[in-house]
Structures are given as C-alpha cells and as structure tokens.
Amino acid sequence: MSFEKICVLGGSGFVGTVLVSELAARGRQVKVLTRRREHAKGLILLPTVDVVEANIHDERILAREFRGCDAAINLVGVLHENVKGRVDKPQARRGDFHENHVELPRKAISACAEAGISRFLHMSALGADPTSRSNYQRSKGVGEALVREAGWDANPDPGTLGGAKLTARRGMQVTIFRPSVIFGPGDSFLNLFARLLKLLPAVPLACPHARFQPVYVGDVAKAFADGLDDPDSFSRTYDLCGPDEYTLLELMQFLQKTLNRGSRLIPLPDRLSYLNAWMLEFKPGAKLMTRDNYYAMQTPNVCSDGNGAPPNWQPQALEALAPAWLTGAQMRGHYSEYRNQAHR
Ligand SMILES: NC(=O)c1ccc[n+]([C@@H]2O[C@H](COP(=O)([O-])OP(=O)(O)OC[C@H]3O[C@@H](n4cnc5c(N)ncnc54)[C@H](OP(=O)(O)O)[C@@H]3O)[C@@H](O)[C@H]2O)c1
C-alpha cells in the first residue's frame, strides 16, 4: 500500500519542514496548507511540494483542498494561547488550544470523509490527557481521543467529545504519534535555554526536576513517513522518545558544558517555580513559560509505560547530535533557529 499524494497541515513548522522534506525525498507529492506562504519558504523549491495558502479552520476550504489527496497529516499545534479559553467546558469561551487541538482535528477528519481520504496521521504529544490540569495537554488529549474514535468502525453513530461533535464517517485508517520534547536545529526548547545561558550570568530554573526524554526531529519525521504506508500502524498510537531520560536541570548542565558557559543555575523549589511561571506569563513578547507549562511539567514526559514505539524504532541520542548545531559547527542550524524566531 502506498499513499502518493499527501496533504499536510502544519507542514511549515519545525517538525513539518523536516517531515515534508522527508516525504519529498521519498518521491511523494506533498501539498502543504499554510496561513502564509512565506512561512513555508524553505519548502517552496522542493520539486514535489506544493505550498498553498488556505484558511484551514474553514471545513469547506479544508475539504476542497484535500480533494485529490489520498492521505492527510495533521501537525498543527500551539504551545501557548494568545486567545485563552476553556477546553473542558463546552459552553465556555474557546481559546487557541481548543481551536487548534480539538476543533481542527475534528474538521480535518470530517474534511477527509468529504474528500474521500481514508488515511490520517495525527500529531499529539506525550502527556496528552483529557483529564490533565494543563490546558495544552487536556486539549491534545481530547483531540487525540477524537481522532482515535474516527478509526473505530464498531459504532456507526457520530459522537461528541469535549464538546466537539464528531460528524465524520468512522473506520478511517488513523495513526497517532505522541512525542516527548523534540530537539533539532531550530527547535524552541534547547535553543531557548541555550540563549538564556548565553545572555544571563545566573538562570533561575523552574521545575528543575521535571523529566523529559528528548527525541530527534529527524526520527519523528521518519516515524511518520514509515508509518504512512504501513498497515500495521493503522489504529495504532505510538509514543516517541529518545534513548535517554533527563531532568531539566541535567539538560541545562549538558548545555552549559556543550556551550562552555559558566552561568549559575538556580534551581527553584516548587512554590517559586509556580510563581516564576506566573510572572513570566505576563512578560510581553515570546513566552518563556506559563502556569500551563508548569502544570504540564508536573507529569514526567517520558516513555516508561504507555503505547510503545513504532516498529524498528532506533532513536538517536541528544548528546551525539545536538553539540553540532549548538556550538555553531553546523551554521545551518543557527540559520534555522533565526528563521524560527522570525517565523520565516
Ligand atoms: N516541538 C516539540 O517539542 C513538540 C513536542 C511534542 C508534540 N509536538 C507537536 O508537534 C506538532 C508540531 O510542532 P512544531 O514544534 O513543529 O510546531 P511549530 O514549529 O510551531 O509549527 C506549528 C505549525 O502549526 C501551524 N499553526 C500554528 N498555529 C496555527 C493556527 N492558529 N492556525 C493554523 N495553523 C497554525 C503553523 O502553520 P502556518 O504558520 O504555516 O500556518 C505551523 O506550521 C504540534 O502539534 C506540537 O504540539 C511538538
């Protein structure tokens, strides 16, 4: 089984750019839907990639753009809300998390049904859980369950989940991926902390004992590209983690050593971590941390028990790959970081 024409939502982002390049390298026709063509500038020159500006939140436009494709991939996600809302109360105001993590997957599944697409790959996140205290994780959890339900063919009735009505036909061939934090040139995790270490003589560190199992962006892209045609991945959920587990403090110490920075790390106790997150929430410009991140970090972001990894999963180690771009040995790594910051 081979899906030749794939429509990608969120294809211009950090993960999307690597995945779309991987699919193009495998000879697939890829259509990337974006709010602004210039967000996907790096993909426009790829010979089998078509970048199309579209309002993907409009279900009719989505169905129109999906027509002619035989698979769809949804990577859209936001880490912070500009418009805040509630995920758990259907009657309450809907924020960016709800729109992008719940409503958008619902619309994408309906649009797939409308356009005759039966294969759908969905990006969730490790820790996604409809009962989480974090709005990000809760919305990802509700969206994930909605997508999973679209893969069931036992119950023919449309359902309702988290206030979002599922109108799509059941029995889609869906695969869900739940990565831990993703690293790579241009990421917004390691690069953010690296910038702080370069700027500040002392770095207060909220949630120093939060646990992660960082996974390389190239491995995540490969898992999607391999899973696309693999019938064994239908109706499966995969957790994606790197080979090693770190606390946030250990990651900072790794960065200190790699960048040869002597900044003092000040691990904050729990109450101060919360206060720090609260204060940073009101900082204008790019968000460093919010209370929602604080809540998310209370759950270890590791793969110890869960859904299992895809077949032949051989993730690469952070310590083997990251120093190359963090230290500037790979200048392109810095370029993609700058592009990411400028959202270009
Ligand atoms: N990065 C990580 O560490 C990590 C870890 C776990 C899970 N994830 C998940 O992986 C996915 C990709 O993450 P990423 O790091 O590649 O994100 P990213 O670089 O921020 O890219 C996000 C993509 O989503 C689209 N997007 C953002 N807001 C949108 C909106 N309001 N309406 C429509 N499209 C919107 C953007 O498309 P345009 O700007 O082109 O419209 C962009 O291509 C997300 O679902 C994220 O939750 C990421």
Image (spheres, helix red, strand yellow):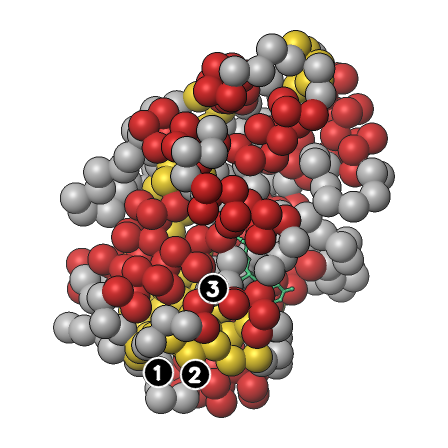
Task: Please report contact status of discs 3 and 2: CB closer than 8 Å, yes or no.
Answer: no
Give x and y (percent) for residue 67. Answer: 40, 88
Q: Which mark is residue 69?
A: 1
Identify the residue shown where x is 28% and y is 52%: 223
Task: Please report contact status of discs 3 and 1: CB closer than 8 Å, yes or no.
Answer: no
Does label 3 point to a residue whose CB lies under 8 Å from ligand 1? Answer: no
- Residue that badge 3 annotates: 42
Give the CA separation, mark 3 to mark 2: 22 Å
- Residue that badge 2 annotates: 66
The picture quadrant where one finds residue 199 is top right
Q: Which mark is residue 301?
A: none
Give x and y (percent) for residue 186. Answer: 51, 45
Give the CA separation, mark 2 to mark 1: 6 Å
> Which one is closest to the eye, mark 3 or mark 1?
3
Does label 1 point to a residue whose CB lies under 8 Å from ligand 1? Answer: no
Give x and y (percent) for residue 109. Answer: 45, 74
The kind of residue tagged 3 is Gly
Q: Is residue 287 left or right of residue 128?
A: right
Mark found first going from the N terminus, 3 or 1:
3
Task: Please report contact status of discs 2 and 1: CB closer than 8 Å, yes or no.
Answer: yes
Give the CA separation, mark 3 to mark 1: 22 Å
Quadrant containing ligand 1 reads bottom right
Secondary structure, mark 1, is loop
The picture quadrant where one finds residue 274 is top right
Mark found first going from the N terminus, 3 or 2:
3
Identify the residue shown where x is 83% and y is 43%: 284
